[in-house]
Image (cartoon, rainbow, N blue to C red):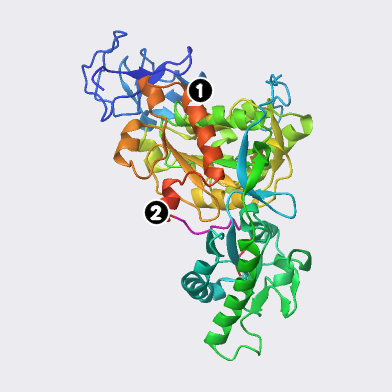
Amino acid sequence: MSEPLYVKVHPADNVAILVNAGGLPAGTVFPSGLVLAEDVPEAHKVALVAIPAGAPVIRYGVLIGHAEQDIPQGGWVHEGILSMPEAPALDHLPVHTTATPHPAPLEGFTFEGYVNDDGTVGTRNILAISTTVQCVAATVDYAIKKIKAELLPRYPHVDDVIAITHPYGCGVAINAPGAEIPIRTLHNLALNPNLGGAPMLVSLGCEKLQPAQMLPSSTLPILQTGPYVVRLQDEEHKSFGDMVQAIMDIAETRLEQLDKRRRVTRPASDLVVGLQCGGSDAFSGVTANPAVGYAADLLVRAGATVMFSEVTEVRDAIHLLTARAATEQVGKDLIREMAWYDAYLAHGGADRSANPSPGNKRGGLANIVEKAMGSIAKSGTSPIAGVYGPGERVATKGLLFAATPASDFVCGTLQLAAGMNMHVFTTGRGTPYGLAMAPVIKVSTRTALARRWHDLIDIDAGTIASGEATIEEVGQQIFDMILKTASGQHQTYADHWGLHNEFALFNPAPIT
């Protein structure tokens, strides 16, 4: 791109972000007549007018900070010269005050999925072996290698065999406040729609998290030889080989059941789509996230469930979200989750300034206020129909807030526990993130990243910044890819390369 270009989001903004790859040098003249007073990196902010020390810096039409020194017109505006404003107070927030129009429902959109006995629908047909404790993880990993080599080829309609391993289960305060979060997360992970309602469990035997606490008998049907549980310490296992064989025997029974399943045409309303961003930059709130927000609105109109998350990345925009609550109770629930996380951070001696990351700052995000404004763009414009705590399984259609930390893998794990069967992940700095349990569509905020990582990025939203495409066009592309991927007709790059990161539990309870 030869012509200097910047993007101003809101008419009230006194800063804009540079679009040109590699940034621009001092003296560059924009078509508007603005002249850069100094070198400004790509995606970073430039002052559109002179901003005196102490004056507000406005982006997205909101205050993102105050200038700590005089900033000349054309100057580089970055985190080092901004002070961060206070977070919105949680009392006296607008609740259920924004009258969101209800556009006509989208009818006739379908995908090919696997119907489960509980009424949920999977986009994959996977056997998962859950674990109660880290002690058994290596044994389960060993058994899965043998299952994939010796058994899985006989069952061509099963997509994969995965392990749900984790560092929890023992050496923890199992009954302490907060312990319910990792326990219900593990419970609900085992019941994810993409696992076909066929949970099986490997236990050591002496751990604090016993199988009956993690997966009650109602979710573990009984075989003629016993429940779908292998306890490695049981007397019947005389050797490591016995343990592995016991796991393989139950796995084969489950594989036989899963292999009988076939994809059938289902309405788009059976989709449960999780939205997330990671490695964000200043383009996230201009290109990829608004496009995902447009796709989210289409999904909601089609009757689907759409989740956005990441508490610290919406906290500074909470006043905008409570106003969109579908009911007063939903607004109160949003405030409840913000207050819980405020207390959690305070107890750990941290606050919201711990976010953003160094990479976010190198990508032009000055602070969490600016990051939050870009993050909530993923939620589109639909009313927020429900709020769920970390690890809870969602049971509501429409746009939902599923409270999670912002950490990529913790958020992804908790969204899977919530019932996610499709995932959309936006990134500006780039990440090879992927999940074994659900397809991940990665959307880049910048064309330069999409070109450089051409075999990792599924959709380039950077074309919005360059004017080659509109938010609506890229949003439609994301919507279409969700349906094709959910149907097994398109493979994401993360799945092509087998990039499946480990599960990461959120455990705010003590470790003993």
At mark 1, the secondary structure is: helix
Up/down of 399 relative to 18, above or below: below
**Label 1 Cα neighbours within 10 Å, binned few <14 / some 14-19 / many ≥20:** some
Residue highlighted by disc 2:
497
- The residue range painted magenta reads 500-507
Give the percent coordinates (x, y) of residue 4: 27, 18
Q: Within the image, what quadrant is residue 25 found in?
A: top left
Identity, as a three-letter code, of the amino acid under mark 2 = Trp
* Residue 171 image label: none
Asked whether residue 340 is in view, the answer is: yes
Residue highlighted by disc 1:
472
Give the percent coordinates (x, y) of residue 77: 36, 25
How many badges with numbers are in the image? 2
Asked whether residue 68 is in view, the answer is: no
Up/down of 284 relative to 498, above or below: above
Q: Within the image, what quadrant is residue 378 found in?
A: top right
Give the percent coordinates (x, y) of residue 341: 62, 45
Is most of the magenta stretch helix, strand or loop? loop
- 296 lies left or right of 322: left
- 104 lies left or right of 126: right
Give the mark, 1 or 2, whose residue is nearer the N terminus: 1
Q: Identify the residue at image location x=53%, y=47%.
A: 488
Identity, as a three-letter code, of the amino acid under mark 1 = Glu
Q: Identify the residue at image location x=73%, y=38%.
A: 333
Q: Within the image, what quadrant is residue 170 found in?
A: bottom right
At mark 2, the secondary structure is: helix
